[in-house]
Image: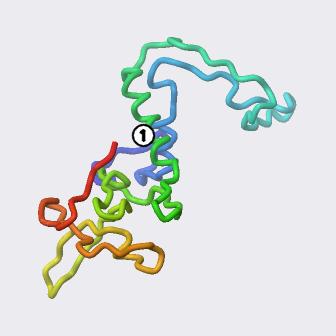
Amino acid sequence: MADGIQTGAGNTKWHTSTINKILRNEKYVGDALLQKTYITDFLTKKRIKNNGTVPHYYVEDDHEAIIPKELFMQVQAELVRRRVVHVSPTGRKRGFSCNHCFAQMVFCGECGELYLRVRWNNHGCKSIVWRCISRLEPNSAEMNCTPGRSTSSCCRRSRSRPSIRF
């Protein structure tokens, strides 16, 4: 990482799985989930992940919280939102595939499809635009939007206004 911050294991490279574990860890809100793993054989001390073989115990307010519970629940709701597959008006399923803050929030005002963030290189002039999926994939759409794009800096320039849904 550019800041030189190390992971809990001492690595300088942060993987998405490391960040996912941090975002899902209940210990930051002061709770504890007991028996995530269990020992199968006491002689070999082999530890395996508990997938329901042994009961889990959830203890609330076990220790002092680092972050507020409301913030933790907002993060969990966002993780669920990103996990849910969006079904377009044409019936095509689309999963979350972008790191941008407006990903899967901007919809076409004409056909109802998602807008995607695309990098353009137009005669050496690089810009970022948002384009309607029906313009990018004309074969999969029932109707093709004619405007189909909006610049990243200002959404007012497109002929059919994109709508943002939360």
**120 vs 158: above or below:** below
Residue placed most toward the observer, 90 or 101: 90
Image-based side of 39 in relation to 18, left or right:
right
Q: Amino acid at mark 1?
A: Glu
Where in the figure is residue 7, as x and y percent of width and height? 44, 43
Camera-side residue: 135 or 103? 135
Q: Secondary structure at mark 1?
A: helix
- Quadrant of res 42: top right
The residue that mark 1 highlights is: 78
Q: Position of residue 105 (x, y in %)?
A: 33, 51
Q: Up-down: is 120 above or below 114?
A: below
* Image point (41%, 35%), residue name: 75
Quadrant location, the C terminus: top left
Residue at left 75%, top 37%? 48
Colouring chosen for the image of the structure: rainbow
* Within-10-Å neighbours for mark 1: few <14, some 14–19, many 20+: few
